[in-house]
Amino acid sequence: MSKLSFLSRNALKYRVSLFDPIRWMPSRSFSSVGEQQEPVTDSFYESSEGAAYGRLTGFGRNTLKTDIIHFLEGCDLSTSDVKFEYNNNFNPISMMLRFPSQSSYDAALRQTTRKGRLYKLDKINSGQWDITESHDGRTVLIQGIPSNAVREDIERFLSGCNFDPKSFRFISRNAIQNTVKAVAVRVATGLEAVNFQIRKNRSLCFNVPVTVRVLQ
């Protein structure tokens, strides 16, 4: 083979290599798909790290939200995370608790066990929390109103208190001697509700002493 022929063949190979599509494909093109893909997330597992809900029972009638928050200290509860569940006569039957996470709920469960099981804590779903009315300490319950009292008598009893007249709820129940009424009414603030209770509890309504409670 002549020297000229050898040089010509080498030059041809060099030109072909310059236009070889495989050789000149960017080296990152094979890995770019894998690098650009976002990690797959499962919304179910994300929601499991959200709020958890529980129902607390076994507490006394005079128990306050703050009593339970202090009892479950370290479980990240605030007063807005506690709702009282009342029966038709506005007697408390349970507390609904909203924990910021499942781990907070688990900590509360351990705490109730460690402190002697004074209360019972059961898991509930968010729907049960949602349908429970929140009184926020702004609803006053007037009990023991005589059956012959009318709305005007009750409004007179509420004189000086900033209340919502549309929020009146009347309850009747049988007493030993007479049928007495209870009225639940919403006031402007929690502070006003407490002040009203202090001023009016055991005061006379239609010449009968009545009791005033604040619904939490």
Image (tube, helix red, strand yellow):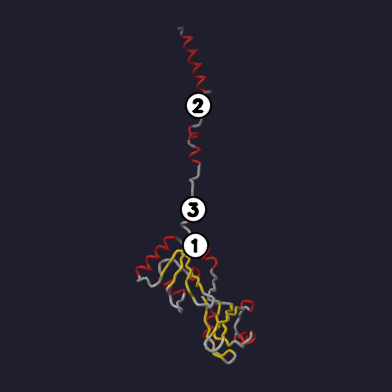
Residue 112 lies left or right of residue 188; in this view the side is left
Q: Which mark is residue 44?
A: 3
Amino acid, disc 2: Ile
For the residue pair 6 and 105, the one nearer the viewer reads as 105
Q: For marks 1 and 3, give the one nearer the viewer.
A: 1
Residue at 51% in and 16% down = 12
107 relative to 182, above or below: above
Image height of 144 relative to 114, above or below: below
Name the residue: 37% across, 67% down: 111
Give coordinates of residue 62: x percent, y percent.
Answer: 46, 79
In which quadrant of the rendered view does residue 75 lie?
bottom left
- Between marks 2 and 1 in the image, the one whose residue lies nearer the viewer: 1
Vertical placement of 188 versus 126: above or below?
below
Q: Position of residue 205 (x, y in %)?
A: 58, 89
User: What's under tag 3, amino acid-wise?
Assistant: Phe
Q: Nearer the viewer, residue 68 or 173?
A: 173
Q: Of callouts 2 and 1, which one flags the residue occurring earlier in the amino acid sequence?
A: 2
- Nearest the camera: 144 or 201? 144
- Give how far across and how far down residue 168 sits, in percent: 61, 78
* Residue designated by label 2: 22
Q: Name the amino acid type tagged 1.
A: Asn
Within 10 Å of the Cα at label 2, are there few (<14), some (14-19), or many (20+) other Cα atoms? few
Mark 2 → mark 1, Cα distance in angstroms: 58 Å
Taking the image as shown, residue 40 lies to the left or right of residue 148, namely: left
Query: Which residue bears the numbered disc 1?
Result: 125
The percent position of residue 125, horizontal first and vertical second, equals 49, 62
Front: mark 2 or 3: 3
The span from disc 2 to disc 3 (Cα, nearest Å) is 44 Å
